[in-house]
Image: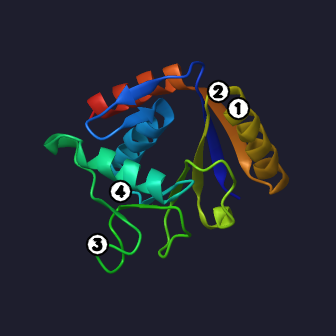
Amino acid sequence: MSQVLFYIHSEDAFVSTAEASLPTYFVQACQLASYYYQQNKKVFIYTENQQDAFTVDEYLWQFDGDSFVPHNLVGEGPRYGSPVEISWLAPQHPRAVLINLSQNIPEFNLNFQQIIDFVPAQEQLKINARMRYSAYKKLGHTLSTQDVKTASQELTNQTEDK
């Protein structure tokens, strides 16, 4: 079964960009996509809806040249997709890592070796995350959690070591 890692956010925060104001877990999802791309792993970012997919796509275009992440919305780009694909629909190509930005467990979750999910600080989103956690557990996935502040520091250290 898959490894599922939930990142726990202790406070609601937003990052303003040229295009929009993004929840910090969206920003973290993009940073994780960059990290896994650097590890030569193919990533699928699953969003709640088309607008969220466009928002994530636009944010990834804003990364500087040194940390550019080749990505596209599903159905665009190369025939077998780019290293990072984004969609509110099921993936069309096999991927190692699923980053879930949806409030539900994707039906295709069993197709991934690793799943990243988030526990936002907002109470209703936190309740939804608990339901996803329980559902992943029932499916037999291996679950773990990590505080986002600790995770951010570790990710920064790993990136700097390269």
- Residue type beneath disc 2: Gln
Q: Position of residue 138 (x, y in %)?
A: 85, 52
Splitting the image into 4 quarters, where does residue 15 fall? top left
Marks 2 and 3, the one that precedes in the sequence: 3
Residue 141 numbered mark, or none: none
Considering only vertical position in the picture, is 9 above or below 66?
A: above
Q: Secondary structure at mark 4?
A: loop
Marks 3 and 1, the one that precedes in the sequence: 3
User: Of tags 2 and 3, which is closer to the observer?
Assistant: 2
Residue carrying label 3? 77
Q: Position of residue 152 (x, y in %)?
A: 44, 26
- Residue type beneath disc 3: Gly
User: Of tags 3 and 4, which is closer to the observer?
Assistant: 3
Residue carrying label 1? 126
Residue carrying label 2? 122
Marks 1 and 4, the one that precedes in the sequence: 4
In this image, 17 relative to 96: left or right?
left
Structural distance between the alpha carbons of marks 2 and 4: 33 Å
Farthest residue toward the left? Answer: 65
Considering only vertical position in the picture, is 139 above or below 60?
A: below
Residue carrying label 4? 40
Observer-nearest residue: 124 or 147?
124
